[in-house]
Structure formats: C-alpha cells, structure tokens
Image (cartoon, rainbow, N blue to C red):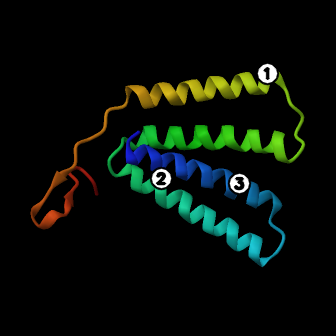
Amino acid sequence: MNRDWGKVFIAAGFEVLWVIGLKHAYDLWTWLGTAAAIGVSFFMMIRAGRTLPVGTVYAVFVGMGTAGTVFADIVFFGEPFQWLKVLLILLLLGGVVGLKLVTHEKPEEKAEGGETQWRGCI
C-alpha cells in the first residue's frame, strides 16, 4: 500500500474519533482531544492530497469515516443493528474501493534544491 493512501486511512480513523468526540465531549480535556483529532485528521488528508487526486482523497476520507462512525455507533454506543444500513455502508465502501482502484497517482516533480514543485496549484 502506498504511503499516501496510508495517510488517508489514518485521516479517516481520526475522523471517526472527532465525530464521536463532537457528540460525547463533556469537559475541557475531551474537547481538546476532539480538537486534536480534527487537526490530525485534516493534516493527514491535506498531506495525502498533495500527491493523490483531491476528489478521490476526499471521497475515500468521507466514505471510510462514515463507515467507521456507523460501526462505532453500533459496537460501542448501542445503536440498533440494521441490515439495510450495513448493506448501504458496504455499497458506499465498494464505491470508495472502486475509486481507489481506478485512481492513478501524480508523479512528483522535483525543483532545484529538492523542493517539490506543484504545477497548476494556486
């Protein structure tokens, strides 16, 4: 697995944590943990978007975060299990996997001094 896709998976994992934190934070420390999870999540997603197509990164990030949040709700917070919900999440994950499989990474171009050069970026 490519290192940049690993960043997307880490970002999605932290997304699950901060979404849960938004619902369950109750004091300064839990809110700080939620804020830290938001920071790590978006930092990793932005880093992955430097070399992978941003639309695909975002779709994978949101899809995995959604599936992870639903899974956590069922397993840890007593949300009722529904087969239709699970099938729809699997359909969503199938689309995410499909996007990953058809996405080709952009080769990095190195400028003088070892800096990465990004063409077309503002």
Q: Residues within 10 Å of mark 2 (few under 14, many from 20)?
A: many
Q: Quadrant of residue 106?
A: top left
Q: Position of residue 86 (x, y in %)?
A: 75, 26
Looking at the image, residue 47 lies above or below residue 31: above
The residue carrying mark 2 is 45
At horizontal 70% and vertical 24% (from top left) the residue drawn is: 88
Mark closest to the chain's N terminus, 2 or 1: 2
Q: Which percent across, then down, holds residue 92?
A: 62, 28
* Helix, strand or loop at mark 3: helix
Measure the alpha-carbon separation of dots 1 and 3.
22 Å
Task: Give the residue number, with chain letter if any, for mark 3.
Answer: 19
Q: CA distance from mark 2 to mark 1?
A: 29 Å
Find residue 105 and report its horizontal and vertical position in percent.
30, 38
At x 72%, y 22%, the residue is: 87
Q: Can you say which quadrant of the picture contains the C terminus?
A: bottom left
* First of labels 2, 3 by sequence position: 3
Q: Residue 11, relative to residue 70: is it above or below?
A: below
In the figure, is residue 121 to the left or right of 112?
A: right
* Residue annotated with mark 1: 84
User: Which residue type does callout 3 highlight?
Assistant: Val
- Structural crowding at the residue carrying mark 3, measured as other residues with C-alpha within 10 Å and reported as few (<14), some (14–19) or many (≥20): some
Q: Earlier in the sequence, mark 1 or mark 3?
A: 3
